[in-house]
Structures are given as C-alpha cells and as structure tokens.
Image (cartoon, grey):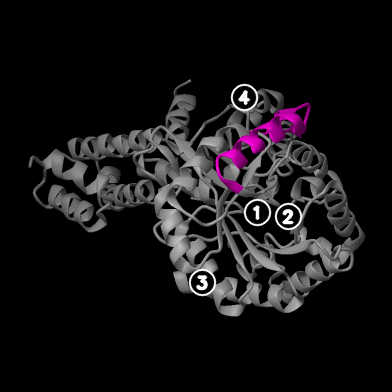
Amino acid sequence: MGSLLINQGLEPGIPPEYWNVSHPENIQKIHLDYFNAGSDAVLTNTFGGSGMKLSAHKHGNSVEKYNQKAVELVKEICPDDRYIAGDIGPSGAFLPPVGNVTIDDFYENFLEQAGFLAAAGVDFFFIETMVDLKEAEAAVKAAKNVSNIPIFASITYQKTKRGFFTIMGNSVIDCVKTLEKAGADVIGANCTIGSDEMIDLISLISNETNLPISAKPNAGKPQLHEGKTVYPTSAEEFSVDLHQMVKGGARVIGGCCGTSPEFIVRIKEKL
Amino acid sequence: MSFSEECKSAILSGDISLAEELAHKVIHEKLDVNEAIDAFSLAIREAGDLFEEGEFFLPELMRSAEAMKAAMVIFQPVLEEGKEDRFRGKVVIGTIEGDIHDIGKTLVASMLTAEGFDVHDLGADVPVKTFIEKAIEIDANIICISALLTTTMVGQKKLIDQLKEKNIRDKFKVLIGGAPISKKWVEEIGADGSAENAVSAVKLAKKVLED
C-alpha cells in the first residue's frame, strides 16, 4: 500500500491515512487490484492510524474518521469470500531510555484505534512492524479488550551476528512466548528483512509455537537508482522464497515494502 | 576494582548515578579529569562495539550514552576553566521536514554528546531553512540530516543545494543518515559522508573534522 501511494504522489509529511478521505478512489483501486491479484485478505490503510502516530503528523483529531473510512473503502468492494484486516502499526514513540512514553500510553493508543476498526467491521486485526515487544504486547492486549475477532501479531526483526532480534533486543523466543500469552492468534514477522533472509526466521518461529505463522517480508533492501527507490527482489524470486517459507511453517503470507499486486499473482501461481 | 574499571562498569551497565558519583569524586579529590574522561570514553566506545556486534541493543546503548553524558556535564565546568580542550565541534542535527522518524537521529545525537560534541538537536520534521539558520547562528562545524523515507531523502539534497546557493557550503561538513541512504546518494548530492549506525557516525564526525 505505502509503496503504491508514494508512486501515486503521496507527499512527504502527509500521513497515508489522510488519503482515505482525500483520495478514496486511489485507496479503493489499490485494494481492488490486490483482490483481483488473488489476495484472500487486504489490510486497511490504517498502518499509521493510531492517535499517537497521527498526532506526530498533526492529524491527531482524525483517528476515528480515518480508521472508519479506511474500513468502509474495503467493505464496499470486498468479495464475500475474502477478508478485511484492520492494520495497526507502531505508535512511533518509545519507552525510556529511548523515548519517554509509558506502556499505558501504548495500551490507550491501540485501544482507541482497535475500537474504531472493530466498530467499522474488520474481520481481524493485523498488528505489524513492531520493533518493541512491549509495544506489541500492549497492542495485542488492547485489541483483545475491544473485540473477539482474531489478532495477528507480527514483529520486525533484524539479522545480527547472534541471530534474529528486534532493535530493542527481543529474541524470537521472547516475542513468540509473550505474544502467545497476550492472546495473539497468529504470530509472525514482517518488514526490514528481505524474503531470502526471512526463510530461516520463519523456521525459527515455527520451532517455538503451534500457532499459525504469518510471513510478510520486503522485496529485499531498498536501493536508489537515479533518484528512484528500487527494491532488488523480483516477484518471481520473492514467490520462490515464500514457497520455502510455507514449507517451513508459514500459513499466512504476503508482501511488505517494495511489493505489489504482481507479487501476489506470482505467489498464487506457486502455491 | 580500579578507578578506570569502575568508570567502565558505570557506562556499560548504564548506571547514571554511579557515573555521576565517579565524576564528582574526580572533581572533589582533584584527580586527573583527562584520565577519567579517557576511561569513560573507552567504555562508551566498547558499548558501541557491543552494539555493532549485536550484544547491545538500542536501550543498552542509549543508557550507556546517557550515563556518559551525565558524567560529562559534571566535568564541563572544569574543562571550561582549564586549558584542556576536549571540545570536539559543534553539531546541528535533525530529521528532515516531512519525516517524523527520529530514533536513529536521537541515538546519533546522544552518542555525539557523549563523545564531547556540542550537539543542537532540532528534533524531527525540521525544515531545511531551520537547519541552515541554526548552523549559522551557532557557527556549527557539522550539520547532520536524517531521513528514513525515500520520499524525504530529497530534503538532504535540498539542504546542500541551498548551502551552495548561499555560498556557505564550505563552512559546514554535511553528514546524512537514514536506512535508505547509500554511498551513491552521498556522492550524488555532494554530502561529506554517511554512516551505517550511530557508532560509525561518531567515528565519521571525528574524521571529517580532522580532514
């Protein structure tokens, strides 16, 4: 979604969620392209739609409007046998010593957003790109509190010399155990890591849990060519890697930064 | 435990009150301030190495930098009186307009401060104009501009272009940072460098001022 909005002229500094009201036809077209490509579920355009994140963009008064509208846009075109995933991304704030917010701030932040998404009618929550396990845990608990719909919780890891960790130092096993306990129904990984490196990560997660696993890698690490951002992994290579992840235990798969509906088409062909 | 070992332990465990206590001890007992700062500096570099090795993560590195900063605040008045010049340079740092990601930038600012730079952190979503005004105002040596989004990276170019237009490009070293930054981008826009992480950023800042 984000990559496509930038290509369509989303200006720096404008939260993508603003486009739910300013450019609804663009957002709806992207969702439709994904359904047509074969997606079973699409994510609402609400990744940065929590109060804390929107406030940083000075759009803090529009949390309800942007989230509600985002869900409506998918609902209008969603085929009966497909699903609407309520996307929830990080708040953008950090606990001490890195930042100065509290776990309660996280919880309240996600309680509000999850509440609007559930009321508007999403089929499940997709909490993603979390780099701090404590924030992810707060988001899962908040989502759990507002609704009984399933909760997918996806963490962003980095590959270090000692293995996979979040930038806060949370290990794979810590993340899996904590999210399970908090009430997540699906556990996974997304962003930062390319599809080639995520194959090993998914196997590791699979060793730690019996819950279904989600995998949503980037199309490699972004590079800049003549002022344009290019993700090096092709749809073909990506779909081959995802096929490996399915063998390694992934049950929910998709693409993060640098992917497009074409990637979904290729993935469907391989499965 | 020797005094320098204590300093090291205070920094690596991110113990702000111990770091302050040790710094006060140096002042009260008239110990060698330079030696003490060397011990602290060595420790903060070790924290940096641990970060690069994947042993330390963001919270540990941040705590170490905070402990180092706390000690430096106590040494500052003595350094200002004395002849010892530990002052490394003035830095204006911020995340470019349109971009609200400030974690990487904040970490670099902390590490630079810990290493003795005089750092003016403008925060996130900072207009090009503000960077330049502040740099002129404080007579900065280095301007550091962070951009996490490929859409906001162009702001880094804009800043350098405006410095050129104003004929003040040579007054400052311009370092750029952010996940999508490549060596090629550094060359394309004519910046003075970029670093992989906060630890390398400090090394780079020292290097460009020596050149």
Q: Position of residue B133 (x, y in %)?
A: 64, 47
Secondary structure type for disc 4: helix
Q: Is residue A267 left or right of residue B11?
A: right
Say which residue label 4 marks. B183
The answer to whether the residues at label 1 and label 2 have Cβ atoms under 8 Å apart is: yes
Say which residue label 1 marks. B125
Q: Is residue A206 left or right of residue A51?
A: left
For the residues beneath circles 3 and 1, the answer to whether they share a chain is no
Q: Amino acid at mark 3?
A: Lys
Mark 3 vs mark 2: give the one in front: 3
Say which residue label 3 marks. A141
Secondary structure type for disc 2: loop
Q: CA distance from mark 3 to mark 2?
A: 30 Å
Mark 1 vs mark 4: give the one in front: 4
Q: Amino acid at mark 1?
A: Asp
Label 2 Cα neighbours within 10 Å, binned few <14 / some 14-19 / many ≥20 = some
Label 3 Cα neighbours within 10 Å, binned few <14 / some 14-19 / many ≥20 = many
Say which residue label 2 marks. A13
Secondary structure type for disc 3: helix
In front of the other: A115 or A226 = A115
Q: Amino acid at mark 2?
A: Gly
Query: Badge 2 sits on which subunit?
Result: A
Compared with A135, A163 (above or below) is: above
